Amino acid sequence: MNDKQEQWQLLEQKIITCGQCPRLVDWREKVARERRRAYKDFEYWGKPVAGFGDYQAQVLVVGLAPGAHGANRTGRMFTGDGSGSFLYEALYQAGFANQPSAPHREDGLQLTDLFITAVCRCAPPANRPTREEMENCLPYMAQEIELLEDIKVIVALGQIAFDNTLRLYRQKGHAIPTLSFAHGAVYRLGENLPWLVVSYHPSRQNTQTGRLTVSMFAAIWNKVKELLGRVN
């Protein structure tokens, strides 16, 4: 194991054993203990969820938090729920994933040149973490970005991911102006900093109402490939 691999292992262990936020600890464990009827025979992860993907990635995807019966059940980002199904199908079509589905942690899914993280690592009640909970968690994303030395594009899935990505870079001392959240927006965060591509979150609420369609989401990943210089 080289030094970088050891740093990743230590960070992931630090994340999955985190207990900084009592409200989130109580909720994630309650969900895992009581379970949803459809998953009553499944073993729930019920712990914080670390980032997942290619450690040499040029693309970082930022979500909100683990789904109560998705990543909080499976232990891997965007795995085992409707949001993940929508996301991984798009990543497969764009060439960033080796398969279009992600039902469980041992399903063989591999990401190429892309890493997925989230603002919060524990499933929050009603998908609404508090500002303090987000602030407690943000250093984990900062550490991942430090280890991901080749990031050229960040894709923010939803308003919270967008706001907190900007907050993180501002905390690092970068003078980033006020930017507006808008699906499809593309911003350069600064010289020698990544591009920021903005998308609605692929939640069931957005995809089932048509606020985010398959073609709209595909356009996001086409823009990412364009920014990486991979135009067909």
Image (cartoon, grey):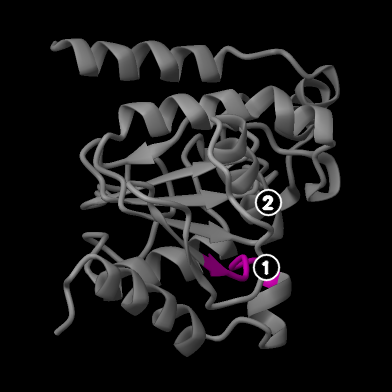
The residue segment tinted magenta is 198-204
Q: Is residue 39 left or right of residue 227?
A: right
Query: Which secondary structure, mark 2?
Result: helix
Q: Residue 59: x and y, percent?
A: 33, 53
Which residue is at 22% across, 51% downward? 113
Please tell me whether residue 219 belongs to the stretch shown in magenta.
no
Residue under pointer 1: 181
Identify which amino acid the numbered label 2 is placed on: Asp
Q: Is residue 73 visible?
A: no
Report the amino acid beneath label 1: Phe
Contact between labelled residues 2 and 1, with CB atoms less than 8 Å apart = yes
Badge 2 is on which residue?
A: 163
Looking at this view, is 210 or 101 the one in front?
210
Q: Nearer the viewer, residue 31 or 34?
A: 31
Mark 1–mark 2 distance (CA, rounded to whole Å): 8 Å
In the image, is 175 to the left or to the right of 36? left
List x then y, in percent, for residue 39. Answer: 64, 46
Is 73 rendered above or below residue 5? Answer: below
Q: Is residue 15 left or right of residue 131?
A: left
Choose between 161 and 203: the one closer to the eye: 161
